[in-house]
Image: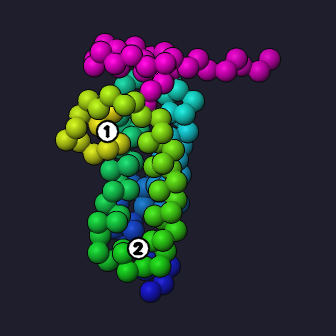
Amino acid sequence: MTTAEFLERFGAVVGEGRMKLPTTVIEAWGQFVESCEAGYRDILDEFTFDRWVRHQIEKVPQDQGLREFDQMRWVEEQVREIDERYRTLLSDQILFPDWPWWEASFPRYAGPQMAADLLRMYGLTVEIREPPPAWP
């Protein structure tokens, strides 16, 4: 099984515009988690939209055809590392127990806008992380 066949199958499974390459999908998930580590700076709606990449990732191991490719070990390893980072950020307060783990709760800290949205929408208080001062 060739890399080209793997990439074709991967793109067919995730099938979302530019999100057809494993590196692109993994990079998007990693960047999202990185933004959460710093304290997500946007509003709740954008957070929900940005987090959607994890749904695309979830399709990958469920596809029997993709599981036959050796390249899946690399994909699974990368996703596992990023998932672990995200899990450490999540609040212990599970708001949606029937939802996927990455949506069941929110990060325990956020930027001011996101923190305000979480308090207003769900009564969830999180630590506010201010952006670092701009360089002169």
Q: Nearer the viewer, residue 102 or 56?
A: 102
Does dot 2 land on a helix, a strand or a loop?
Answer: helix
Outermost residue on the right side: it is 136
Question: Going 31% across and 60% down the picture, which residue do you hit?
Answer: 59
Alpha-carbon neighbours of circle 1 within 10 Å: few (<14), some, or many (≥20)? some
Alpha-carbon neighbours of circle 2 within 10 Å: few (<14), some, or many (≥20)? some
Question: Going 41% across and 39% down the picture, which residue do you hit?
Answer: 50
* Res. 28 in view: no
Instruction: Locate the N terminus and report the quarter of the image it occupies.
Output: bottom left
* Res. 122 in view: yes
- Amino acid type for the residue under numbered disc 1: Glu
Residue beneath label 1, please? 103
Q: Position of residue 99 (x, y in %)?
A: 23, 42
Does dot 1 land on a helix, a strand or a loop?
Answer: helix
Left/right of residue 95 with respect to residue 73 in the rendered view: left
Q: Nearer the viewer, residue 2 or 37?
A: 37
Residue beneath label 2, please? 8
Report how far apart the C-alphas of labels 2 and 1 lie in the structure. 29 Å
Q: Are marks 2 and 1 in contact (CB under 8 Å)?
A: no
Question: Going 52% across and 59% down the picture, which residue do you hit?
Answer: 78
* Quadrant position of residue 93: top left
Q: How is the image coloured?
A: rainbow
What residue range appears in magenta? 107-136
* Quadrant position of residue 91: top left
